[in-house]
Structures are given as C-alpha cells and as structure tokens.
Amino acid sequence: MASKVRVNLTLDEALVAQAKAVGVNLSAVAEEAIRLQTRAEESRLWIEQNRSALEAKAKLVEEQGLWSDGLRLF
C-alpha cells in the first residue's frame, strides 16, 4: 500500500455537507478522481510528444495498407 500524504483542498461547503450526509468518503473520491485525471493527462502528453510518429505511421498505412489486407475474410 502506498504511503499517504495529507493535503488541503478547498471545496464547496454545501457539497461537502451533502456528501458526508450520505456517507461519501471524500478522500477516496478525490484520490480516484486525481488518478483518473492524471492518467488522462499522461495520455494526452504522450500523444502530443509522439504525434509526428503517429501521423507518419498513419500515412504509411494509408499509402501501403496493412500487411494483413490480403488475408482478411471480412
């Protein structure tokens, strides 16, 4: 299990009260939201950093097709 660190967040007071009233674990929700957003940002950055290679590969496939084009039955 990863070690935890205490942080301060500023959240809407009414929303926090509502979440606590129904038993929402704010720490767990925040952690999962941060995890998902971090993955999304890492993916966006990877695509940005590799855009030229991705575009070159797409152009090559457009020009030459896929190696399996003659093998597909659909």
Image (cartoon, grey):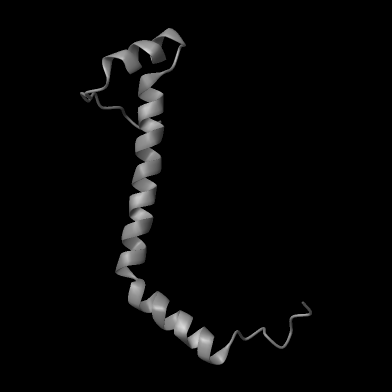
| Residue at the spot 40% in from the left edge and 83% down from the top edge | 56
Residue 24: x percent and y percent?
A: 44, 17
- Quadrant in the picture for the N terminus: top left
Left or right, residue 20 beside residue 6: right
Q: Tell me which corner region of the image, top left, top right, bottom left or bottom right, holds residue 17.
A: top left
From the top left corner, tell me how far across and down residue 15 is, in percent. 34, 17
Among all residues in the image, which is located at the extreme top? 21
The spot of residue 37 in percent (x, y) is 36, 43
Q: Residue furthest bottom?
A: 64
**Where residue 33 appears, x then y in whole percent?**
38, 35
In terms of depth relative to the viewer, which is nearer, 12 or 42? 12
Q: Quadrant of residue 57?
A: bottom left
Q: Is residue 6 above or below residue 21?
A: below
Going 74% across and 84% down the picture, which residue do you hit?
71
Tell how many labels: 0
Q: Is residue 47 above or below residue 21?
A: below
Give the quarter of the figure containing the C terminus: bottom right
Please report the residue visible at 38 percent of the width from the left and 56 percent of the height from the top: 43
Q: Residue at x 40, y 15 (%)?
A: 19
The quarter holding residue 49 reads bottom left
State whether residue 32 is above or below residue 9: below
Q: Residue furthest right?
A: 73
Residue 6, placed above or below residue 39: above
Is residue 33 rendered to the left or right of residue 69? left
